[in-house]
Image: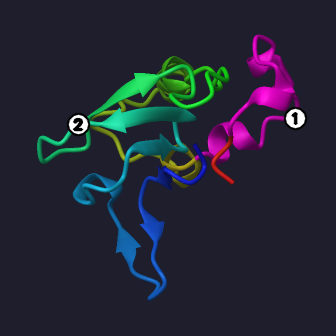
Amino acid sequence: MRAQLETENCENENGQTEDPWDDPDVVVVYTPKFDEYGLPVRDGGTSMVVIGYCPWCGARLPQSRRDAWFDAVEGLGLDPWEDELPQEYRTDAWWNADPAPAQHRDHVEPERVVTPS
């Protein structure tokens, strides 16, 4: 899966930001902010079908943090659609700095988790 994986807004060899939704060769995308893997929908936008298992080996992927992200943003008293969000909520920094990240992934067999790096 790592060979097919593209991280949202990654840089190419020239240092330019690429959008994996524009590349028809990209099969699986990863969205760090939500810790989600998905199959891109080729409709001109950034939609994807979120997947819970690797399509090649069947390994369980980390559970999406999308609901937790919305809860955290709303817990700050912000509207995720209208308000300017702090920088850490635009990336994976909001959850990646968690001192106990394992508590979010108890259901995953660590030796079989597929990660973007």
Q: How many marks?
A: 2
Q: Is residue 60 left or right of residue 64?
A: right
Q: Is residue 105 left or right of residue 13?
A: right
Q: Say whether residue 98 is magenta.
A: yes
Q: Amino acid at mark 1?
A: Pro
The N terminus sits in image quarter: top right
Q: Say whether residue 115 is magenta.
A: no
| Mark nearer the viewer, 1 or 2 | 2
- Mark 1 — residue? 99
State the separation of the CA atoms marked 1 and 2.
34 Å
Q: Is residue 71 left or right of residue 17?
A: right
Nearest to the observer: residue 21 or residue 87: 21
Judged from the image, the secondary structure of the residue bearing numbered disc 2 is loop
The C terminus sits in image quarter: bottom right
Judged from the image, the secondary structure of the residue bearing numbered disc 1 is loop
Q: Residue at x 76, y 20 (%)?
A: 105
Q: Amino acid at mark 2?
A: Val
Residue density around tag 1, few if under 14, some if 14–19, many if 20 or more, within 10 Å: few
- Mark 2 — residue? 41
Q: Residue at x 45, y 77 (%)?
A: 12
Residue 42's x, y, as percent? 18, 42
Q: Where is 85 relative to 76, above or below?
A: below
Residue 66's x, y, as percent? 49, 24
Q: Residue at x 34, y 56 (%)?
A: 20
In magenta, the rendered stretch is 92-114
Q: Earlier in the sequence, mark 1 or mark 2?
A: 2
Nearest to the observer: residue 96 or residue 43: 43
Residue density around tag 2, few if under 14, some if 14–19, many if 20 or more, within 10 Å: few
Residue 30's x, y, as percent? 49, 43
